[in-house]
Image: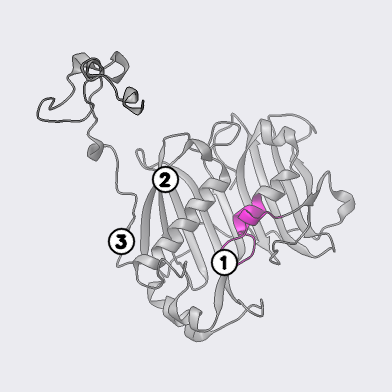
């Protein structure tokens, strides 16, 4: 009775082949459903290479990123976490493109691998001009202005309008001892690729406050890293910390304002078994405590439950419908 399963001939007449053949070279437009009658676009005219390119003798790396729908925040704009991931990606690709690292080493140079060293972020400062939307293309330029530092400029690919500026200070840490290390031979590998220029952002000279927990307006406890929060160095990626400090930010600020600037100091790494607490204190730049048309400044502290500080930070927020930034 298995032969009864074989499709009769008339089915092949009702449903013509979907693939080209001698008898049916292609499905004509009249046979297609109306919603499938489309003409392909010339993608080569609208999409630039996303693999990146070098300029200024390899000292500057430029890469484009398409904003994906899953990178948007509740306001429909790209999240700051997504933009910072783009910055990190461009940095790794810069080192790989000039031959300092490989796809397997994730930004580590040959001398760093020999000495068992990894990169860690010590300080990060960001100025946000505006947040792109879904399907926008952003262009990230990355370079090393001084040994141990890295700068980024993010612009709208179509208009050239500045979206974000960022500067950072990187250190080397021994992967086994987890202690900071100064190895001249490792730094010497990077020196030929230093642009030797002024930082893209003037350093915020205000010290991040010494925290007194009694001044915290908002607290979030019981924060535990997940397996997917760890990176290849077996600790929590520095971008993830930002999501944790925003967990304790007032909801009224997150809903009624947009991020203008951020200054962070990373003081200690945390791993898979860490338990953290996030604290925020509000410093409003105005007279009213609840007005949505005022700039807001938040001080942040991220620490382990035993009291060890993980991160100190300061964020500045502008009213959602305001233009321009504070820095």
Residue drawn at 58 percent across, 82 percent down: 182
Q: How many marks?
A: 3
Residue 113's place in the image compared with 242, above or below, is below
Residue 74, by quadrant, is top right
Number of the label disc, if any, that sits on residue 275: none
**In terms of image quadrants, where is residue 248?**
top right
Q: Is residue 323 above or below residue 104?
A: above
- Left or right, 58 with respect to 124, comes to left
| Inter-mark Cα distance, 1 to 2 | 22 Å
Task: Residue under label 1, please give it.
Answer: 169
Mark 2 and mark 3: Cα distance apart in space: 16 Å
**Residue that sits furthest to the right in the current view:** 214
Q: Residues within 10 Å of mark 3 (few under 14, many from 20)?
A: few
Q: Nearer the viewer, residue 92 or 320?
A: 92
Q: Residue 4: percent from the left, percent from the top?
A: 33, 22
Residue range (magenta): 225-242
Asked if residue 47 lies in the magenta stretch, the reply is: no
Q: Is residue 7 left or right of residue 246?
A: left
Q: x%, y% of residue 175?
A: 61, 76
- Residue 135 placement (x, y as % from top left): 42, 35
């Amino acid at each position: 009775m298995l032969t009864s399963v074989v499709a009769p001939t008339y089915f092949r007449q009702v449903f013509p082949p979907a693939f080209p053949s001698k008898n049916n070279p292609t499905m004509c437009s009249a046979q297609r459903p109306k919603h499938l009658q489309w003409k392909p676009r010339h993608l080569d005219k609208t999409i630039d290479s996303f693999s990146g390119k070098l300029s200024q003798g390899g000292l500057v790396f430029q890469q484009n990123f398409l904003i994906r729908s899953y990178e948007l925040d509740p306001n429909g704009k790209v999240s700051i976490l997504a933009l910072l991931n783009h910055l990190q990606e461009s940095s790794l690709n810069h080192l790989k493109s000039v031959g300092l690292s490989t796809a397997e080493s994730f930004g580590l140079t040959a001398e760093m691998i020999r000495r068992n060293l990894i990169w860690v972020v010590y300080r990060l400062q960001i100025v946000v001009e505006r947040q792109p939307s879904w399907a926008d293309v952003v262009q990230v330029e990355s370079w090393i202005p001084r040994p141990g530092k890295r700068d980024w400029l993010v612009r709208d690919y179509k208009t050239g309008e500045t979206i974000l500026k960022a500067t950072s200070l990187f250190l080397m840490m021994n992967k086994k001892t987890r202690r900071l290390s100064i190895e001249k031979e490792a730094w010497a590998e990077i020196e030929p690729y230093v642009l030797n220029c002024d930082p893209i952002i003037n350093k915020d000279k205000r010290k991040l406050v010494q925290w007194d927990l009694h001044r915290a307006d908002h607290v979030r406890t019981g924060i535990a890293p997940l397996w997917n929060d760890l990176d290849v160095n077996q600790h929590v990626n520095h971008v993830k910390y930002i999501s944790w400090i925003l967990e304790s930010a007032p909801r009224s600020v997150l809903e009624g304002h947009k991020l203008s600037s951020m200054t962070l100091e990373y003081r200690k790494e945390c791993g898979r078994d860490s338990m953290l607490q996030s604290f925020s204190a509000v410093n409003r730049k105005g007279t009213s405590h609840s007005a949505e048309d005022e700039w807001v400044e938040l001080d942040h502290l991220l620490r382990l439950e035993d009291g060890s500080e993980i991160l100190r930070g300061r964020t500045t927020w502008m009213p959602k419908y305001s233009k321009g930034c504070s820095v």
